[in-house]
Image (tube, coloured by chain):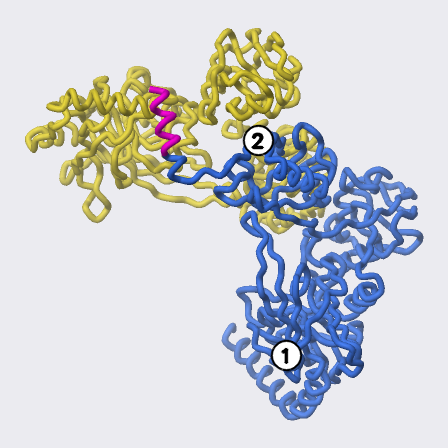
Chain colours: A blue, B yellow
Amino acid sequence: MKRIAILAASCLVLTGCATVGASSDASVLRAKNKVAPALVHIRPVKVVFSGGERREEAVVGSGFIISNDGYVVTNEHVAGESTLVRCVLYDKSEFDAEVVGVDKYTDVAVLKLKSDRKDFPKVALSTSKNLEAGQTVLALGSPQGLARSVSMGIISVTDRYLGGRDESVAPYNNWIQTDAAINPGNSGGPLVNLKGQVVGINARRLGGADNVGFAIPIDIAKQVVDQLIEKGQVTRSNIGVTFQETMSKTDDPKQQGVVIADVDPLSTGAEAGLTPGDIMLSVDNVVTNARFEEDLPAVRKLIADLPVETSVTIKVQRGSEEKEIAVKTQALSDLRGKEVDIADWGFTVSELTPAIVRRAQLASSKGVLISGVQLGSVAGNAGLQQGDIALKLDEKEIDNLDAFANAIKDHIAAKTKLVLLQVKRGALTRFVVVKQGEPVAPQAAAEQGNGDNGNEK
Amino acid sequence: MRSKSIAIAIACLVGSTAFAQEFTAKQLQGFYDKVAPAVCIVSYSSNVTNPSSGEVSKRNTRALGLIVSAKGLVMAHGHMQIQDSDPFAIKITVGQGDNEVEYDGKLLTKPEDVNVCFIEIANNSNVTFPFVQFAPGPLHLGDPIALIGLMGDTLDFNRSVVVRRIGSVLDKPRTTYCLDERLLFGYVGSPVMDLAGHIIGVIGFDLSTQEGGDLYVRSGHPLVYQSDLFAKYIANPPGENDPKVVNDGAFLGVFSQPLTDDLAEYWKLPQEGGIVVSTVMPDSPASAAGIQPGDVIVNFNDTPLKLKLDREVANFTKLVRDAGVGKQVPVKILRAGQPVDTSVTLVERPKSARDAGEFEDKTFGLTVREITTDLRVLLNLAPDVEGVIVRRVKSGSWAQLGEMQPGVIIMNFGGQPVKSLDDFKAAVAKIEAEKPAEFTVFGRAGARTGFFRLQPRWNSSN
């Protein structure tokens, strides 16, 4: 039984290949030739915070030129937080680029080549609306750093939902899944149809699987790119609500709306009285239905696209009642907080995001996250640990990252001998004394140690 | 600490004739002849729960047992009864080669204050077993000791004698003898003979949790558990391993850290040590008495606290535990540098996760537990999070098909609010009676809440 099925399957594949093969050579070449001149091999130097220090790291990615004056689209994870971005074009000419703007939520970045040229080759952007599974696509880019590579496959699924309940993974879009080979280094490169138009941005792949790659649909990217070029950033609204598909409560196809699964207690949604279990039916009379998880990104995007700091009317079903609730939108904070290093003390510290505040069960969003601590450093010796949330400095509340970093810099300049931090570590709080002193040479330290013991005796 | 080591070293030099002594071959042969018959093999299976996934796997283990009474009381290392492991099918193999006899064994309640466990041999025909008699005996740095352990499977678990030395003597939290070298697993629990020929203890690894054991867990250093730590349990063996009435002593409800000299200097307090209150548990005696984070406890129950090191905090914990449930205890505090005299009425220590009630629902495949105070701290749950926590999800069950996972806190089950194990049992019973085609579970996974839909097929055999 099983054997027959396998044979049948391989026959199909072989037949399929033969048909595609006969007609595709010319169209594949035509499509490749249309896009390739605008393909960019990108070599950014990224700022990385790890192990309690700030380091710089050269990486490789891909991108494509979208305008004759040299705007380039790539992934945020390629060009974000970089100090230098070098671009190598298809003709091997090199340009530095500036980062125009990045959006962590969709993983899209826009660069501008530093050049006055107005004749850069550019790609044609298609729409991702009418894609079909089975359609042939090409992926262009620099897999494993190998520039100007082309691979071919088909679209496996047009609307793959990735993310589960972790909204930090592309909350606003589904993904184009393709079996065209995508490897590290392909990130930011174009996924192209046989007309030579860009339908997606290659961004990730499933590790441990063969040929399961994912691209950001170009329609989602276009809207972000426009905002980045215009304003340098993307502004979104937030009401602090996590949604779930209605299938999570019932498989009744008549059930309308989307389930409110969670409400952040520090959000405007909680203030307005939204409650987990409510079914959201509409926002300002726009119906919000999400029966399956693939429908969730559109609902989230609807909220995100609302103007910031305005009141909207949310209709919910609560039990058998329907209620209209006015909720004020607030600006969605950045996915990852700003991070700085305090080199003299050997630690790095970042802003608290609502997700961190929530996870740490903080009563307010005041404080900073200790994101890394170097072993043997002043901070490390004081017992400060990665993941600690510093709430108070010298017994005063820490308002934000800048205030904290400045206060620490003042202490460093003043060589204050003892500085007190109150940190939250898991459910517990703890006092940490940071001791600044003149550095002691190892030899001197050893002698001093012996002396102490002698006194004790 | 260091000055003490020096003192010991001097003592050793003075007694150098004793130090130079080694075991003679004859002595070791005597040790083997006398003690090896009391060394037995404890074989058991255990259900081991993976604490993160909740998956239960079965494992077979063999360990060294030491017969400590003629009736057949066996002592083994405490690792046999650790959290997340549930031993069953216990067999005791006594004797070697052709004389091997296998008996059933029954696990007794594990003592709290020493990391050993006891097994009773099902001695239906009143056999008199060879057993070890212990004698108290102090050890010193450098003393040689002889052990009898089990060799591996391929060597047929033959008994083997090895000689080690005491490499370090710790004085806190109690006198602890550390060996100079590592040992193979088959020596864990071995009898320890001193130069005078007395069996003075057994080989162990960790201190008990009551002794602040986890400080030593990662050291991997074999220790000697002196016989005076467990002699009382040999004289009066603990009861059968039933769910027991918990009495872990008194509870104050603070987490604390020592008043180091640096903290004292920062707060301009005398550098005399103390206990800095870092966290006060809600609804605890400490919060009732108005104790606040930042308070420095300098005297508790008329005992001055001169603690300056992290590991010394265990001494304070012990002081609290032993102070007496229901007792009003005087406490001297420094608050913002000013002395404050107050008192706290200690209560019974809240149930710990180890003793939490558990319920396995066979219909949906969920095993859930009460949320105890320590779990609340471990998982950083706010006081308003109430429910039961999923410990296991049976493979292929309705709950697994509903994508439920270990760690989820169930707050509502099929429309029934769940705040306790009893609520959960009642909710399960109600659904089993009503047999709905589908129902919703509301819970919390990580920091967020969400819904799970369960769709049992009531006519199937699940």
Does residue A51 appear anywhere in the picture? yes
- The front one of B450 and B399 is B450
- Residue B192 magenta-drawn? no
Judging by the rendered image, the residue that carries numbered circle 2 is A417
Point out the image quarter for the N terminus of chain B. top left
Q: Chain of mark 2?
A: A
Disc assigned to residue A153:
1
Q: Residue at x 31, y 22 (%)?
A: B3
Q: Amino acid at mark 2?
A: Lys
Q: Residues within 10 Å of mark 1 (few under 14, many from 20)?
A: some
Residue B306 picture location, percent across and down = 47, 16
**In the image, B409: left or right of A282?**
left
Mark 1 lies on a secondary structure that is strand
Residue B47 picture location, percent across and down = 43, 40
Mark 2 lies on a secondary structure that is loop
**In the image, A43: left or right of B233?**
right
Q: Quadrant of residue A79?
A: bottom right
Residue A270 picture location, percent across and down = 81, 39
- The front one of A207 and B246 is A207
Q: Is residue B256 above or below residue B425?
A: above
Residue A445 picture location, percent across and down = 40, 35
Q: Residue at x 69, y 47 (%)?
A: B453
Distance CA(mark 1)–CA(mark 2) = 63 Å
- The front one of A433 and B109 is A433
| Magenta region | A447-457
Q: Amino acid at mark 1?
A: Gly
Q: Quadrant of residue A392?
A: top right
